[in-house]
């Protein structure tokens, strides 16, 4: 793999742990479940964006940027990790955040990730639900440039080939940890939204020649996400890695039906998965991504899709700060 050739800054505590989930496996009567603790990447409560930002921030600094602009929802984990990365590296950070259906909720508006964004010194630009985030970021960049600042825009979720390298690198890390444990990973299950995590894993495992199956649990209720988002991300990431073409060793499947009524909207199945992981393993999931992904994993396991001795890895992408932003959605 050519990952070492790309500029990178150290932001994450790596490798993150890969641990068995024995009580949860028993609770759902198999298969053998493991968790990759990317909720513990270490930057301002952690999460999957930190790996992507190691490459995205390095690229921005190499371009001479002294400011990063990015976007997400009010409770964006990506925005919070970008704010923390910028603080650590001495860049300024401007966040274009979009309102949503939870606008009446005091915790949603001021607790959780957005509380941390403010503590981390980011400048917040709040916009109504449905506004065009890319246009808003471009306008903001223009305005900053005209006052002598050198901004770079990091796309939604840091999901673009440079950011996705973080998850191609994670594929190598997972393969090495599985070898150490003397197991092969038959499948990986994770939440998918802007697609870079899944795309980076797919490109990474494929380049390694490691045969596995990747399940992305759709959290957006977007039936076209594979064609619109994930496949193009995989293709572009493979090109950047000097390994263009179709996937040969990795199968990617999207699991639908676990997003509830849509992005950030709670479901009973998500609440049940969050509670089950907490009560059986002391493992905290989040309401927007990892809770729905775990619900997808439990449903998949119960459907008999895996053999009882299959090794299934749940990639925990983080989001724990979101528990506090969505607290009213979790108590019922
Ligand atoms: C952003 C995010 C995801 C989704 O990752 P993508 O690369 O955008 O598909 C999953 N879980 C959490 C906690 C996230 O913040």
Image: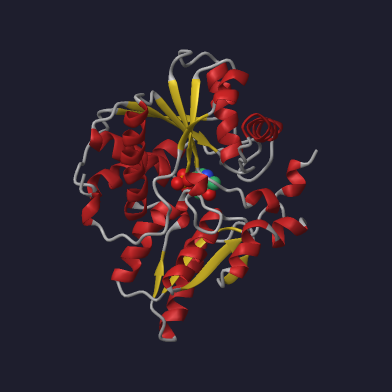
Residue at 74% across, 44% down: 329
Residue 304, given in percent of the width and then of the height, sits at 52, 13
Residue nearest the observer in this picture, 251 or 116: 116
Q: Which corner quadrant of the image does residue 277 belong to?
A: top right
Residue 288, given in percent of the width and then of the height, sits at 61, 44
Q: Would you say 43 lies left or right of 110 here?
A: left
**Up-down: is 250 above or below 121?**
above
Q: Which corner quadrant of the image does residue 109 belong to?
A: bottom right
User: In the rendered image, which quarter contains the C terminus?
Assistant: top right
Residue nearest the observer in this picture, 259 or 167: 167
Residue at 77% across, 59% down: 106
Is residue 257 something one can see in this rendering?
no
**Up-down: is 308 above or below 193?**
above
- How many marks on residues? 0
Is residue 157 something one can see in this rendering?
yes
Residue at 51% across, 56% down: 78
Identity of the residue furthest to the right in this view? 332
**Up-down: is 116 above or below 313?**
below
Residue at 42% across, 54% down: 12
Residue 132, given in percent of the width and then of the height, sits at 53, 61
């Amino acid at each position: 793999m050519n990952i070492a050739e790309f500029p990178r800054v150290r932001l994450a505590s790596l490798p993150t742990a890969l641990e068995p989930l024995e009580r949860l496996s028993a609770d759902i009567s198999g298969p053998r479940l493991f968790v990759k603790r990317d909720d513990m990447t270490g930057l301002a409560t952690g999460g999957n964006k930190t790996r992507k930002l190691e490459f995205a921030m390095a690229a921005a600094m190499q371009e001479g940027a002294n400011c990063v602009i990015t976007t997400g929802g009010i409770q964006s984990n990506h925005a919070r990790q970008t704010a923390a990365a910028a603080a650590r590296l001495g860049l300024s950070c401007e966040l274009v955040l979009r309102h949503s259906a939870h606008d009446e909720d005091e915790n949603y508006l001021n607790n959780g990730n957005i509380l941390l964004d403010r503590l981390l010194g980011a400048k917040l630009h709040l916009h109504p639900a449905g506004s065009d985030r890319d246009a808003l970021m471009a306008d903001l960049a223009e305005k900053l440039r005209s006052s002598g600042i050198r901004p770079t825009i990091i796309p939604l979720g840091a999901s673009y080939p440079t950011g996705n390298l973080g998850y191609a690198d994670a594929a190598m890390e997972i393969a090495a940890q599985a070898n150490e444990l003397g197991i092969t990973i038959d499948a990986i299950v994770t939440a998918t939204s802007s697609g870079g995590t899944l795309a980076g894993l797919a490109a990474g495992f494929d380049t390694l020649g490691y045969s596995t199956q990747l399940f992305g649990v759709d959290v957006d209720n977007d039936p076209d996400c594979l064609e619109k988002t994930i496949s193009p991300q995989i293709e572009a990431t493979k090109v950047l890695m000097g390994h263009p073409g179709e996937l040969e060793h990795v199968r990617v499947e999207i699991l639908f039906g676990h997003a509830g009524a849509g992005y950030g909207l709670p479901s009973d199945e998500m609440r049940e998965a969050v509670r089950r992981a907490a009560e059986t393993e002391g493992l905290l999931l989040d309401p927007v991504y990892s809770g729905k992904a775990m619900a997808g994993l439990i449903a998949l396991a119960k459907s008999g899709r895996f053999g009882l001795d299959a090794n299934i890895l749940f990639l925990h992408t983080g989001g724990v700060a979101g528990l506090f932003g969505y607290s009213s959605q979790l108590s019922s």
